Image: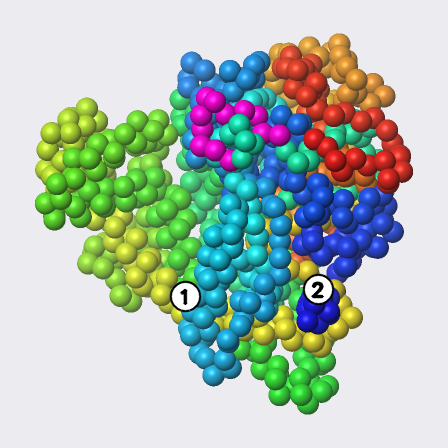
Amino acid sequence: MKNRIIICLLALFTFQATAKEGMWIPYLLGQLNQAEMQEMGLEITADQIYSVNNSSIKDAIVHFGGGCTAELISSKGLLLTNHHCGYSQIQSHSTVEKNFLKNGFWAMSSKEELQNKGLTAAIVKFMKDVTNEVMEGLDDDMNLSERGEHIQNNIQAIIKLRSEESPFDFSIVPFFYGNQYILIAKETFKDVRLVGAPPSSIGKFGADTDNWVWPRHTGDFSIFRIYAGKDNKPAEYSEDNVPYNPNYHLKVNTNGVHDGDFNMVYGFPGTTQEYLPSNEVHNIAEVYNPARIDIRDRLLKILDKRMRTSEASRLKYASKYARISNSWKKWIGERNGLNESKGIERKQKFENEFLAAVNSKSSWRNEYGDVLDQLKKLYDDRRPAQLERYHYIEIGYYGIGLSRHMFRYRKLIEEAEKEDPELKSIADKLMEGMPKFHESYEPEIDREAMHQLLPIYIAAISDQDLTEELKMLKSLSDEEIHIYIDKLFEDLIFLKDPKKFAKLMSKKPKKAAKKIANSSAYKLSIEMYEHFRNVLNPRVSSLNEKIEFYQGRYLKALREVFPDKRFYPDANSTLRLAYGKVEPYHPKDGVTLNTKTYLSGVMQKYVPGDYEFDLPAKLLELYESKDYGVYGDDGKMPVCFIASNHTTGGNSGSPALNSRGELVGLNFDRAWEGTMSDLNYDERICRNIMVDVRYVLFIVDKFAGAGYLVDEMDLVHHVEAKVEEMDTTNP
């Protein structure tokens, strides 16, 4: 049975890939990738990268907050990740008086490290294929709903059994659109404290202008620490907790990187869609993304204008602006990259090869002859409702802050109608969150956003199955909609008189609930959401189930008709390893972009007083005196470098490792020309961007004066050494 499973896995993992393409499952590296990686320059074994029975590099790789990656770099639980991954935590501790976003933060002792409620750090303990167990009892006569329910029941039963036998957190994740299922066991730590962060003028240098762009000069890092109970196990926050002592932590190599060096990125990439048919890639590039780009473009201009003139507004909206602009710019680059690399045409060519192969054999033709046509039709059938969904998400959820805020009152209003005796406690809990709302909200900014965005939403939704409020808005002229918006804001007591509203919520919560329920803002927000949930989601979901099934059949067909090509699984926030080399690229004719940047380039971009390109005085002084300590390279201070690793969102904060598995950098971005790599990887122009670990150390030590943190780390300075010298027994 074991041999049969391994043969099936090997067949599953075949795809038309180069040595640099792919996000590979670590526990299969020995079977699928080790020989190739070692040919490229890897000096260690697959078992040193991932092992269950021995400490390995995987024990230092951390799922940070569920959305980013981090890595353990000391025996005392010191955790390194990106500045933008820790941004919301840094912001939450910031005030106008103590602005850690602007000025940075450095704990000079453990007592100064800051608690972050709700922040988690998870470490994978093991991964195991459970495909046979998940699919046990499936019947070919089952319809899609029955099949899905049966699989979910099996998954829940497996997790329940595992959870009874082990303290770990378990999940079972589908790969290849349900052709494979992997059980993942994690240990999740809940006491993660902020240790250090450079000012945004370093950690976010270049901000949105440089985002997704190479050359890059950003010191995108922050430092946290995992705490555990005295038994070294996960524990809720307590002053009695102690720094976590990991099974393994990364050594930090201060020799730097050179062109041609082997390089790896180890982390938790979020989502890719490498196996979409060509028409859905067209839908993304030419239908969905342009609509979403236009909406975010309008919102970003509103925020940028206010943030440039008001420090208070900048502090309130910094995190929201960063979140919105990140995808906005990525989508623009994705579309441009697909056009430049002829990504859609390449997929069409591959599909023609697939169809020719299928039609060459009667058994394939009978089983898979219509699978691609069916898949394409389903994606096109979904397009109208999906486009409407995106309009709600971009406008009703991300765009108009008031719309999202009004959901908070739903439970209060529903319970007020039931005469719930717990109504006051519900109201009190709501009011606990109001200071945070006001700290990150300005009515005039949101009013302007609604003036620009609500008419777009109203025009985008179809007339089918509309609520009464939405029908009414569809009948209004643009001028009448603007009058409606102004009146909507005037009706809100929690904006006009927060103190009066707080008193009303405390003394008469039922009356407060009624006042909110009767407001136009609440009615509009709820009806927009109900239309999204009850009309658009069912339309899309009814097709998604079929799409998932046919994508799975398409993948099954691909591996069967192309047995000599290597397939890798789409990213799905599970632990993966990508590998490539430090190498330049040529984004356009006559242009070559080199692999490294230096502090001199930071100075060339320096604009005093500019919120994107200003610099702290201390960094200017260090540059002028060339005081780089032991971290400089031939009189220069390295800042960032690139390599051809296949990365995506979620890889932010991932360690960049050399051929010996030592830390040389910190992944934080991709070059703009290659952001389409989520849909269509092209090794000629796809490059991931990393901050050089020497710049991290320089900022921590020379700039911040927190050299005690560097003293915690295991620094190595060698260029080459034998494989057997790698220590897999640390901490």
Query: Which residue is at a point 69% across and 10% down the rendered structure image?
Result: 621
Q: Position of residue 331 (x, y in %)?
A: 56, 49
User: Which residue in the protein does label 1 denote?
Assistant: 541
Front residue of 474/334: it is 334
| Residue 70: assigned label | none
Q: In the rendering, at what x and y percent does residue 707 appear?
A: 67, 15
- As rendered, which of 159 and 497 lies closer to the eye? 159
Using residue 132 as the reference point, say whether residue 430 is left or right of it.
left
Distance from label 2 to label 1 (Cα)? 29 Å
Q: Residues within 10 Å of mark 2 (few under 14, many from 20)?
A: some
Q: In the image, is residue 235 part of the stretch drawn in magenta?
A: yes
Q: Which element type, helix, strand or loop, lies under badge 1?
A: helix
88 within the magenta span: no
> For the residue marked with disc 2, what is the amino acid?
Phe
In the image, residue 463 sits, relative to residue 269, either above or below, namely below
Residue at the spot 76% in from the left edge and 52% down from the top edge: 20
The magenta-colored residue range is 234-245
Residue under pointer 2 = 13
